[in-house]
Image: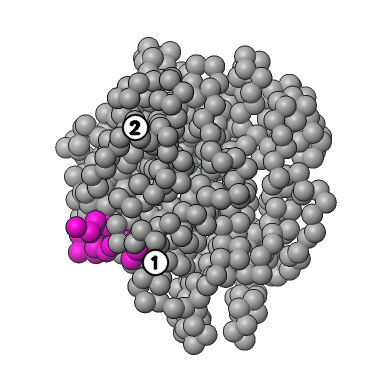
Amino acid sequence: MTLIYQSTRDENNRVTASQAILQGLAADGGLFTPLSLPKLNLDFDQLQQASYQEVAKLVLAAFLDDFTEAELDYCIESAYDDKFDTPAIAPLVKVEGHYNLELFHGSTIAFKDMALSILPYLLTTSAKKQGVDHKIVILTATSGDTGKAAMAGFADVPGTEIIVFYPKGGVSKIQELQMTTQEGANTHVIAIEGNFDDAQTNVKEMFNNSDLKLKLQEHQMQFSSANSMNIGRLVPQIVYYIYAYAQLIKTEQIKSGDEINVTVPTGNFGNILAAYYARQIGLPIGKLICASNENKVLADFFASRTYDKKRPFRVTTSPSMDILVSSNLERLLFHLLDNDAAATKRLMDELAVKGEYHLPEAVNQDILNLFAAGSATEEETAAEIKRVYEHSAYIEDPHTAVASAVYRAYAERTGDQRPTVIASTASPYKFPRVAVEAATGKDAGNDFAAVRELHALSGVAVPKAVAGLETATVRHRAVVASKAMQEAVEDCLGLS
Ligand SMILES: *Cc1c(COP(=O)(O)O)cnc(C)c1O
């Protein structure tokens, strides 16, 4: 039987896995979501010996059930290779009383690599399966991180082209260098004179421009999106929770069947939703602990059952969690409403019009009870980096530290002693100045000095992603006015 993916906003919009991946977002604005979950045999006697790739195969075969075995092998082997700096792909490290699941060993040293290294292959394979032989053109605007992770994933993937726009002067020096030194004949990086919103708005306009669409078609091309609402990004994230549990058994930290908690530093709710799906297919998870920074719209939602985005946007030291509209929460909402698309659509419409919605009385309480939530202030986050460093000589990045602080407060409040895995979403080398200043109280002055200081403090090898940057060749130098973005796209693709 083939799994059905349905839009969260229209019960008649139903597709298979590969169709959902190819479409990305549903045309009605909803998110494709599995209506029922596959049955998996999670035999941990076997799984504790399995490689990351083998666990990936088990999970992907169950969720992406219209892919053949050969197609999945191709995708998995192309994604999880020596782009990662450890064969474990996602190693588990014991830090004080909890376990950090390090999701930052890929090309851009942050957790987006876990899914973006496989998405290009899932996307091109889906296109083939659907009889689409157009070149897939990925167009994205980035405020820094996602663009680089998407490029690293798509670089030199046959049948794809990727164009990334970023605001000149709106990203850090390290982020800019990461992008402008990107290799790959199919990658294009363009700075714009304008801010992130200008870049985002113009990208959206290009997606909706029917003349441009036609032009692309004439050249055997079509746009697609790599954003986090694509189930092709969600499903690969289920893998590492199962892999982590197997590693806990293998290293005799737990016995098969023991419950664990999972704490996730959350922005768009994709990562924690993947942990929820892992639980629903049989992983013994007790609590899913959702951690927010000062943009604590999710912590407030779980406390008050009201989602309220009408609040000031705060710029924090954990920028990937600076989000007020958490897109993937819509999928949980759909499940809380017993997969009622009409009811989900009503609440999402309310959010769009009024900036808030209230969860009705009659929701699936069993699902809601799985979640705990909390938030950490900037001071608490810095203090947590310092505390963990002083206790364990381990330096957490600010995102991970938010989760670590929220978990500790949760454990103290509830007395819950179950072993806990924290999704460790970025390497401290991605945010070296913040990490060093929090750990030592001293500012290193600039990013590269901070990298050296961080190495001295933690003894952790400087990752390739950062080590070569100071001397890497800049390959992309284009700067265009924000009004000239479409022209730049047509140039890159040879349409004009
Ligand atoms: C994207 C990101 C997050 C948030 O993950 P979501 O799936 O959007 O909740 C947390 N930390 C880092 C470092 C990220 O890049």
Q: Which residues are magenta?
A: 1-19
Q: Indicate the position of residue 383 as horizontal and vertical percent values.
A: 61, 20
Q: Indicate the position of residue 384 as horizontal and vertical percent values.
A: 59, 21
Q: Measured along the vertical axis of the image, is residue 159 above or below residue 266?
A: below
Beta carbon at label 2 within 8 Å of ligand 1: no
Residue at the spot 80% in from the left edge and 59% down from the top edge: 473
Residue at the spot 66% in from the left edge and 15% down from the top edge: 390
Residue at the spot 56% in from the left edge and 41% down from the top edge: 87
Q: Secondary structure at mark 2?
A: helix
Q: Quadrant of residue 104?
A: top right
Quarter occupied by the C terminus: bottom right
Amino acid type assigned to the residue bearing label 2 in the image:
Phe
Residue 153 part of the magenta segment: no
Amino acid type assigned to the residue bearing label 1 in the image:
Ser
Q: Nearer the viewer, mark 2 or mark 1?
A: 2
Q: Earlier in the sequence, mark 2 or mark 1?
A: 2
Front in this rendered view, residue 232 or 464: 464
Q: Is residue 411 visible?
A: yes
Quarter occupied by the N terminus: bottom left
Side (left or right) of 410 relative to 159: left
How many residues crowd mark 1 within 10 Å: few (<14), some (14–19), many (20+)?
many
Q: Indicate the position of residue 307 as horizontal and vertical percent values.
A: 35, 40
Q: Quadrant of residue 459?
A: top right
Distance from the alpha carbon under mark 2 to that under mark 1: 31 Å
Q: How is the image coloured?
A: one colour
Front in this rendered view, residue 65 or 479: 65
Q: Is residue 202 visible?
A: no
Residue holding disc 1: 126
Side (left or right) of 457 relative to 241: right
Which numbered circle lies on residue 222? none
Which numbered circle lies on residue 44? 2
